[in-house]
Amino acid sequence: MITLRRGREADADAAGAICYRAFKTIAEAHNFLPDFPTSEIAAGLLGNMIQHERFFDIVAEMDGRIVGSNFLDERNPIAAIGPITVEPGDQNGKVGRMLMQAAMDRARENSFAGIRLLQASYHSRSLSLYLKLGFDAREHIACLQGPAIGKPVPGCFVRSARADDLAACNSLCFRIHGHHRSGELADAIALGGAASVVERAGRVTGYATPIAYFGHAVGETNDDLEALIGAAPAYLGPGFLLPTRNGEMMRWCLAEGLRVVHTMTLMTIGLYNEPEGAWMPSVLY
């Protein structure tokens, strides 16, 4: 019998081990590197999410043992699902669907304008599940990785984001997406140095939180994204994410020595506005 409950701090190690094994198994089956290099790193991430008051956590148990977990990021007007993982030996049953449904129900109960996630393109089973649950595919996304470019863009000044940048950054995000991501940005600023802004002529024209797998970015133009990517000391995690239809940015990244590691699909339910400007999603959306 499968039961669902809220996560506890003590669940982090078991849930993290499952998260690591699940991503490793499916990635290596398709000759890709796993998202998490070790079980400890996965456990650290999930433990932080369990402790965060604006993440909803859900754990699946079967016969008294943890077999999966899922998370809902509630920091912004749009809710984000993930990471969702199920013990490899217990996949292809009801666990994944139950974990997804619990997160979706939570989002609807709390009246979020929309729900989003990113799906690994090589994982056809998850694509099928999300489509059945009502998600629509919106964007083809590339994960890029490589040595830091370390290249400034003329006319663009990149610096660490401050708390007094929040209003300008939120306004920019709203102009591009039709909603802000203030909760994520505030968290990144509070970490000190995690978030950055780009200025042109003394005006904030882009920001990132940071250039990484779990970071997103927006800019008025591709110059702003180039400046943010070029100033990043490294691209944490598997890499950073970029819509492949932004051919100009994709070609710039490839010309600067970055490589496409894998691709993903941005999927949504509810509010979705066609972005107007330059942008990069996080692995959540």
Image (cartoon, helix red, strand yellow):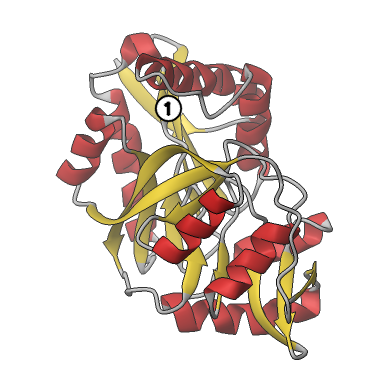
In the rendered view of the protein, which quadrant contains the N terminus? top left
Q: Residue at x 47, y 37 (%)?
A: 83
Q: Nearer the viewer, residue 77 or 155?
A: 155
| Residue at 49% across, 62% down | 249
Q: Nearer the viewer, residue 36 or 239?
A: 239
Give the side of residue 15 with respect to residue 247, left or right: right
Q: Identify whether 193 is placed above or below 91.
A: below
Residue at 24% across, 42% down? 130
Task: From this view, report whether residue 65 is shown above or below residue 238.
Answer: above
Q: Residues within 10 Å of mark 1 (few under 14, many from 20)?
A: many
Extreme residue toward the right, this view: 192
Quarter placement of the C terminus? bottom left
Q: Quadrant of residue 63?
A: top left
Under circle 1, the secondary element is strand
Residue located beneath label 1 in the image: 85
Q: Position of residue 198 (x, y in %)?
A: 71, 74
- Residue 111 location, x and y as percent? 37, 66
